Image (cartoon, helix red, strand yellow):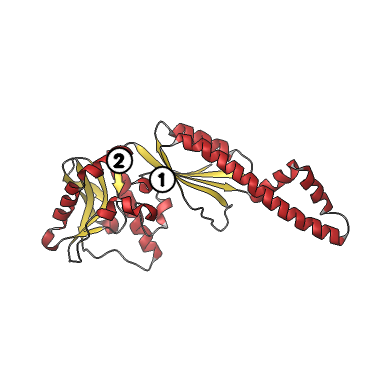
Amino acid sequence: MSSAGDGPQALAGSSSAGCPAQDAADCPSSRVPKLGDPTEGCYVYCVGRAKEEGALGLTGIDGKKVRALGVGDLCALVHDGASKPYSSRDPKVVADWVLAHHHVVEAAWRRWGAVLPITFNTIIAGDGGKAHENLRRWLQDERERLEGRLHALHNLAEYGVQVFCDPGVIAREVADANPELHALRERAISGSRGAVYLSRRQLERALQRDSQVRISQEVEAFYRRVTSCMARVHVEPVKDAPGERPMVMNLACLVSREQYPGLEAELHQMSAREGFSVRLVGPLPPYSFC
């Protein structure tokens, strides 16, 4: 099992941070008022349940000083600047911005125990210095809903769980365990030229079919076990990368401190299974569950 405990690597290649697109309607940022395009703006990183106001010693995007703006028991972390969204054709520049955004969100999460991450490039506008006023009004209007979601996320962390397989190892296991496939493999290495060719084609198709069944069975059994160790889970699309084994499962998991040892035990068990490996990313603020 491999681990990426510091988390930012999982975000560095993205152009946005915060709630995933499929949950946009429920994201706090989807209801943040974006008011026109004046010269002054307030960039928002996250919302937390804390009575804080002013500078917190945090540095955000492009070295901007981050401050807390509060209303009652809620506050948002922001920096002041132009209302024009951040934009660059250089992927490295964008990755640095997203990573800086993440660092602020993560610092707030560790400080307060729960945050609602706001999507990268969310900027509240307001002529004549009214951006802060507009943000405070939004916090007040949405107070009950935001507090409820923060309460539900308190002391929970997001983890990414990715399962990979080695098709060659699985195919050998399948062939060794099936006498018919074993015999077909023997015929594929001996006999007449025509018989060898036909046997090899039959073997390839049978191994591909039976290997996929075996992989699906293993992954489904792992999913049933591992979901008992988390509060919530999102099944994400698999993402293959050059030079890596094929990914067969990609999960975003919301896990409490009490549940984590059980999750870790299941991951070790799966990674000990020949032909499979597991990658753990986290802990992270609850980007997929905000």
Of helix, strand and loop, which one carries label 2? loop
Of helix, strand and loop, which one carries label 1? loop
Question: Which residue is at 48% across, 32% downward?
Answer: 262
Give me the disc on residue 114: 2
Q: Pinpoint residue 113: horizontal percent, then vertical percent.
A: 30, 38
Q: Pinpoint residue 193: horizontal percent, then vertical percent.
A: 86, 61
- Mark 1 residue type: Asp
**Which is nearer the eye, 44 or 3?**
44
Q: Measure the C-alpha gap from mark 2 to mark 1.
A: 17 Å
Question: Which residue is at 68% across, 51% downward?
Answer: 209
Can residue 60 be seen?
Answer: no
Q: Pinpoint residue 79: horizontal percent, then vertical percent.
A: 22, 55
**Which is nearer the eye, 208 or 12?**
208
- The residue carrying pointer 2 sits among few (fewer than 14), some (14 to 19) or many (20 or more) residues within 10 Å by Cα, namely many
- The residue carrying pointer 1 sits among few (fewer than 14), some (14 to 19) or many (20 or more) residues within 10 Å by Cα, namely few
Residue farthest to the front, as pictured? 25
Name the residue tied to disc 1.
6
Q: Taking 259 as reference, is 189 above or below it? A: below
Disc on the earlier residue, 2 or 1: 1
Q: Taking 200 as reference, is 218 above or below it? A: above
Question: Which residue is at 26% across, 40% downward?
Answer: 148
Residue farthest to the top, as pictured? 258
Task: Name the quadrant of the N terminus.
Answer: top right
Residue farthest to the bottom, as pictured? 89
